[in-house]
Image (cartoon, grey):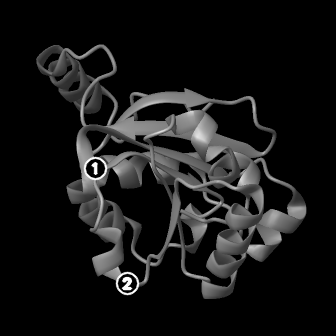
Amino acid sequence: MGGESPLWGWQSGEKRTGFNGLVIAADTDSSLLGYIQLEKAKLGIGNIRTINIQDRNQLHQYQYDLVFLRDVFHHLQNPVAYFSELRSCLKTNGRIAIIDWNERASIFMRISGHYTPEQTILDTMTASGFICQANYHHLKGQSFNIFGFTHPNGNDAVFKALRAKETKETPNKSPCRTD
């Protein structure tokens, strides 16, 4: 979601997904989606489809292994509803990766409102029924979190019990770090 950056997804689609894989470039900007169509034709990349996510029927045409959002989260009007709906589009082991500007972003990003505090993303995804499986802090001024339905080690029962205990002891604390 958020097709403005070819480096992160659609341009490397065949390399990342293999010959039979499919990359969906999704955005709300029709002119950007048109640009992606032209570029993929120029580059001879055949496994990319573009969809306008304002059309929910297009969004639900596929089952996704990975939904990757880069610098999009802060634009979502009702993120809990959005991600709750997106759950039905993910495969059983599907993941959502979110990179967004955070509270350590440049002053311009903070003044313009083009950022989301990382804890807000973690809380939103938990409220949407996802579990934070990993997070990374190597991107300057950005958070990078990966969410799924299950604990990354696969032991959901133990993870849920630990999560319930952690939540009881430290309310609103995410299993992922925000430091």
Task: Point out which mark residue 5 bears.
Answer: none
Q: Is residue 70 above or below residue 175?
A: below
Q: SS for tag 2?
A: loop
Give the mark nearer the N terminus: 1 vs 2. 2
Camera-nearest residue between 10 and 167: 10
Q: Quadrant of residue 114?
A: bottom right
Task: Point out which mark residue 55 bears.
Answer: 2
Tally the numbered discs. Answer: 2
Q: Are marks 1 and 2 in contact (CB under 8 Å)?
A: no
Amino acid residing under circle 1 = Leu
| Image location of residue 47, percent across then percent down | 52, 53
Question: At 88% across and 67% down in the image, what residue appears?
Answer: 108
Camera-nearest residue between 179 and 1: 1
Camera-nearest residue between 27 and 161: 27
| Image location of residue 124, percent across then percent down | 39, 55
| Residue matched to label 1 | 90
Q: Is residue 64 above or below residue 133?
A: below
| Image location of residue 74, percent across then percent down | 59, 67
Question: At 20% across and 57% down in the image, what residue appears?
Answer: 88
Q: Quadrant of the C terminus?
A: top right
Q: CA distance from mark 1 to mark 2?
A: 17 Å
Q: Is residue 149 above or below residue 108?
A: above
Question: At 77% across and 64% down in the image, what residue appears?
Answer: 42
Question: At 49% across and 52% down in the image, what residue appears?
Answer: 121
Amino acid residing under circle 2 = Asp
Instruction: Specify whether 44 is left or right of 28.
Output: right
Crowd around label 1: few <14 · some 14–19 · many ≥20 (10 Å): many
